Each structure stands twice: as structure tokens, then as C-alpha cells.
Image: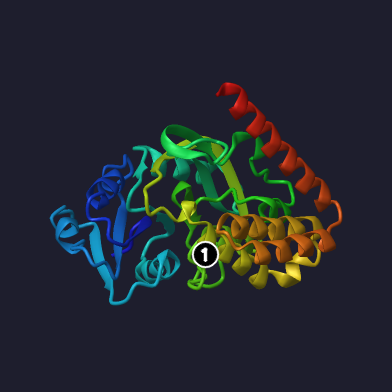
Amino acid sequence: MPVKVSVILPTFNRSHSIVAACTSVLTQSFRDLELIVVDDGSREDVETPVRAIGDNRVRYVRRPVNGGAAAARNTGLAEAKGEFIAFQDSDDLWLPNKLQMQLDLFARLPAHVGVVTGAKIIYGRDDHFNYGPGRIAYAPPAHGRLKLDEDQLGHLLSENRVSLQNALFRRDCFPSFTWFDSKARANEDWEFAIRLAQHTTIFEDAEPVVLAFISPDSISSNFRKEGIGIVRVLKKNRRILERYRRQHAALLMDVSRSLYRARRKRAGRRFLLASIARYPGAVTWVAQSLLRKSYARIFRRARR
């Protein structure tokens, strides 16, 4: 039977948080939805707590082999029946009015808008990506919001403004129903947003709609996976990046930083030099980064 919204929730070994994440979807003020829980080959028993929820809007789908969040989301998309598509993560919470607020926005926006996205409050890191207890961030930063009349593709090549949990998508906003690159184990949402902006218009609202929590196994703290994810962005958008030299150089610089953090300095230097060759102004980014690190060291010493 058709529903208004299909919500896809991929999970891997998060039996301790899955019920709370599901409940934040099922207790939405807007109720015409289905929740598709995609168990991505978990070693823990995820099925029992999901089935114990006892809501006929929940469907449990198990993948026999772990393929990562992108592959699990594609599995959920193949099962979806809704006019709109939303995504939830297995360790985060939606705010109670998320869906209704975003559907109301769609009703007021032009028909060419295929995506509405908002913000989230993140516990476990600050706005400068320092991780640890007691740190809180608002993401993405409010000052960089997408505008309807700008070059959204160019903007998204510079920074990702579309976190999947924060967004609501029209089912037909993208020409294929295999949305995500299953070879990317991080930044797959960013890579998808770049391709998405070539087919539809995105509206970004400032209101937070999600409470997110940085967990010990969070992809966002794995620098190697981050770097590989950005390499996938580079590989899948070569033709587009020919028109955006500055953004291309910035992506190469991001890979360099991830490699340095992962202690792969030789590979990091190679991407650094490629960034400067693509856009010589990237030299100033390196100088600014070194200055910031110097000031931070001086400040820490002064505090001690």
C-alpha cells in the first residue's frame, strides 16, 4: 500500500541504540510513513529488538554480507514505496516535527525543488572538529546556507551541505534509484549531493531537525576512510571538476590532510603538490593552516 514517506535506516551492530533511533521516527507528528530497517550483516542480534517494537509500519530487511552504509541505503531504496524518501542513522534521534516541517516547506517551495534539508545538533565534537565529551556543534554552519538562485553545484564542491538524516527527498529527484556509491565507506553523502545538484534544486533551512551523537566507531573520526571517500568524489566527478579548478584543488588538499592524519605522509605530500599544481593559490591555504597550528601551540603553552 502506498505511503507518503519511506524512511530508510541502515544499521550495523548497533543493537543498543537502534530502538531509540526507530522510536524517534515512529513518534513523528507526521505518521503516514514506513520505516525500513536495513541490517547490514550485523554480528549482533538487531532483528529481535526491531521486531519487538511492534509497529506495523516497520519492515526489517537483512543483507547477508556487510557492504557499508551506502550499499545498505541502496538496499532500502529498492524496497521503498513512498512519494518522499528520508534517511535515519541507527545511533541518532530525529526531532519530533522533522517530517511535518519539511513537508510543509515542500508545499510552499517551487516545483523544481527536489530536496529540503536542515541542520543538526551534534554531541561529541565542536565546530572546529575537536572530538570529546561535552563538546557540541551546530552543523552544517549557518553562515554557508545554500541559496535557491546560486550555483549550487559549485557550492557543494566546496563543502557538503546535505547530511542525509537532515534531508527529505522527492522520490523522483534523481534519475536512478541507486543513489549511493557503494565503494565509498565515508563521504558517500557528499559524493551523492554533488551528483544530485546536477539534477534538481536543494532548499536548505536553518532549523535543526536531528540530534546526532559521535560514537567511538563513527565514520567521521576515521581519517583513512574520509580520504578514500574524497578520492571517490574526485574520480566520479572528473568532467565536472575541469570547470571548477579552485574546488578541485581544495578536494585534493582535503585528501592530503586526511592522509597526513592517517600517518601516510608521502601520499599526503603527493596530493598536496597536485593541489598546488591545479590551483597555485592553494599555497596560501597551506600558509594559513601552518599559522593556525603555530598560534594553537603558542596558546596551549601559554595556558600551561
Position of 34 compared to 274: left or right?
A: left
Which quarter of the image is occupied by the C terminus?
top right
Residue 131: tell me if it is visible: yes
Q: Residue at x 31, y 42 (%)?
A: 28
Q: Nearer the viewer, residue 190 or 217?
A: 217
Q: Position of residue 132 (x, y in %)?
A: 43, 38
Q: Position of residue 275 (x, y in %)?
A: 77, 60
Residue 193: tell me if it is visible: no
Q: Residue at x 24, y 65 (%)?
A: 60
Q: Residue at x 31, y 39 (%)?
A: 29
**Picture quadrant where residue 79 is located:** bottom left
- Taking 64 as reference, is 168 above or below it? above
Q: Residue at x 67, y 39 (%)?
A: 293
Q: Position of residue 262 (x, y in %)?
A: 55, 59
Position of 95 compared to 270: left or right?
A: left
Position of 15 compared to 78: left or right?
A: left
**Picture quadrant where residue 206 is located:** top right
- Taking 70 as reference, is 193 above or below it? above
Q: Residue furthest right?
A: 280
- Amino acid on which disc 1 is placed: Asp
Position of 111 compared to 54: left or right?
A: right
Q: Position of residue 145 (x, y in %)?
A: 64, 40
Q: Which residue is mark 1?
A: 172
- Taking 267 as reference, is 33 above or below it? above
**Badge 1 element:** loop
Which quarter of the image is occupied by the N terminus?
bottom left
